[in-house]
Image (cartoon, rainbow, N blue to C red):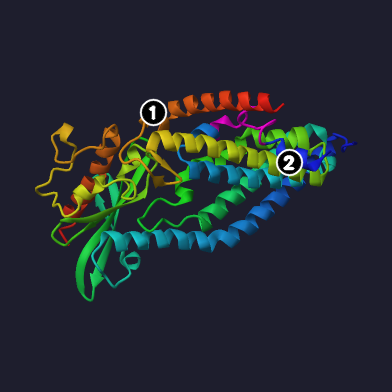
């Protein structure tokens, strides 16, 4: 087999051609997948709103607003039925054992936690991923609690939350994220 | 070369994980459940087949001194394509808001670029063989890799979570060690021992 001679001109030309063709191909695929990717991401959020908020009939994504609390900025998504606000979904994050944990917490107008959905997590499978409702009932203990009289930290730290066995760091991070969302909600005036 | 032999060599005789010990980073990282193992294996197989196909058809046109960078660019392009496609079409959470497949495999997909199996096959096989043979080789090695990941993922899921393919047959926790990274080494060690015994008996 005789390959092209490794002359300077040949090498430059080859690499140029390879990169140009690759970028063209990537450009095409990027354009083709741009819309489906956007749809997938907004679908995911919409699905989360239906899980964490009571029944609503508006489009929370379109009415979202930012609330700054502490060093963070939180995205608030109000859920309405007619003119009445039935609850607010708050997007919040914290750093867990494996990386960032992103939650959507649904609050009722009086500040009670309705439900929580995990948007993103990198926690250990079989241990920290018990924060997912599909893996265990752990996160149910937050539902229907008002952080006013439910201390959002693990029992080891003097709070009211039972930590996941062998995943204290994950449990702490989860509590922290919910607490941050609640603080932002209070700061914004319970709505 | 006999194409059937060329295809099946990836499973036992030249299995990338059990015999060649290539691509151990994604092997250990993604196999905490059987489904994750299969998905990672199939994504790698796609990249392997496509890069083998392209490399074998353009190998003659690439001067020797720049072949590695050229191959890497080709491989990286296909990995990015897989990443985009998975992000677009395998990104729907389950009915109980389980994380999507894309969310679970997350960072490991871009890492296929540095999986030495892919570059290894491009350099050692595809650049010296014709298109059909390279395609069969890519498919065989890729599915062999998938098979290994599935085996390891199953063992770790059964022992660690008491379930298989997300179907739980033991309530409560399993042996938690096996879902954590050290457990991956243990499980892999014993699997390799078993495979060695098996392949010795066959040959």
Left or right, B113 with reference to A56? right
* Crowd class of label 1 (few under 14; some 14 to 19; many from 20; radius 10 Å): some
Pick the front one: A165 or A114: A165
Give yes or no for residue B136 being in the magenta stretch: no
Which secondary structure type mostly characterizes the magenta part of the structure?
A: loop
Both labels 2 and 1 in a single chain: yes
Q: Position of residue B2 (x, y in %)?
A: 82, 40
The extreme bottom residue here reads A82
> Which disc, if any, is residue A191?
none
Q: Which residue is mark 2?
A: B7
Across the whole image, how many numbered discs are drawn on residues? 2
Residue in front for this viewpoint, A101 or B21: B21
Query: Is the residue marked by circle 2 packed among few (<14), some (14-19), or many (20+) residues within 10 Å?
Result: many
Q: Chain of mark 2?
A: B
Please give left or right for residue B84 compared with residue A133 in the image: right
Q: Quadrant of residue B117?
A: top right
Residue B8 percent location from the top left of the image: 71, 39
Q: Which residue in the protein does label 1 denote?
A: B177
Looking at the image, which is closer to me, A102 or A134? A134
Residue for point 64% across, 44% down? B45
Q: Which residues, given as a range, are shown in magenta?
A: B11-26
Q: Which chain is mark 1 on? A: B
Q: Of residues A87 and A136, which is closer to you in this image?
A: A136
Q: Residue at x 86, y 35 (%)?
A: A7
Helix, strand or loop at mark 1: helix
**Could you tell me which secondary element the residue under label 2 belongs to?**
helix
Relative vertical location of residue A69 with respect to residue A48 in this rendering, above or below: above
Work out whether residue A145 can be spotted: yes
Residue at the image point whose x is 19% and y is 57% from the top: A188
């Amino acid at each position: 087999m005789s390959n092209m001679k490794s002359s300077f001109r040949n090498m430059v030309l080859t690499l140029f051609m390879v990169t140009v063709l690759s970028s063209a191909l990537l450009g095409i695929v990027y354009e083709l997948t741009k819309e489906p990717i956007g749809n997938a991401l907004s679908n995911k959020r919409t699905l989360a709103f239906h899980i964490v908020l009571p029944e609503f009939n508006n489009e929370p994504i379109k009415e979202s607003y930012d609330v700054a609390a502490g060093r963070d900025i939180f995205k608030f998504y109000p859920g309405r039925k007619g003119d009445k606000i039935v609850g607010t979904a708050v997007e919040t994050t914290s750093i867990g054992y494996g990386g960032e944990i992103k939650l959507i917490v649904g609050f009722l107008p009086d500040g009670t936690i309705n439900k929580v959905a995990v948007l993103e997590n990198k926690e250990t499978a079989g241990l920290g991923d018990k924060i997912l409702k599909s893996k265990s009932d752990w996160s149910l203990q937050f539902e229907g609690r008002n952080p006013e009289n439910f201390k959002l930290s693990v029992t080891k730290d003097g709070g009211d939350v039972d930590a996941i066995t062998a995943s204290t760091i994950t449990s702490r991070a989860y509590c922290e994220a919910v607490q941050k969302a609640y603080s932002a909600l209070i700061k914004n005036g319970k709505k | 070369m006999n194409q059937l032999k060329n295809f099946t060599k990836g499973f036992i005789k030249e299995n990338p994980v059990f015999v060649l010990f290539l691509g151990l980073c994604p092997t250990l990282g993604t196999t905490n459940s059987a489904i994750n193992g299969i998905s990672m294996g199939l994504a790698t197989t796609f990249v392997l087949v496509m890069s083998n196909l392209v490399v074998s058809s353009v190998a003659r046109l690439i001067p020797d001194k720049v072949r590695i960078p050229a191959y890497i660019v080709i491989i990286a392009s296909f990995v990015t394509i897989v990443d985009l496609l998975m992000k677009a079409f395998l990104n729907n959470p389950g009915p109980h808001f389980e994380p999507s497949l894309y969310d679970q495999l997350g960072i490991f997909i871009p890492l296929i670029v540095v999986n030495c199996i892919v570059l290894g096959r491009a350099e050692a096989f595809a650049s010296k063989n014709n298109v059909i043979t390279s395609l069969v080789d890519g498919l065989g090695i890729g599915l062999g890799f998938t098979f290994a990941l599935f085996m390891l993922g199953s063992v770790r899921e059964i022992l660690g979570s008491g379930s298989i393919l997300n179907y739980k047959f033991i309530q409560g926790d399993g042996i938690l060690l096996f879902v954590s990274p050290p457990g991956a080494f243990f499980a892999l060690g014993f699997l390799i021992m078993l495979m060695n015994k098996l392949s010795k008996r066959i040959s």
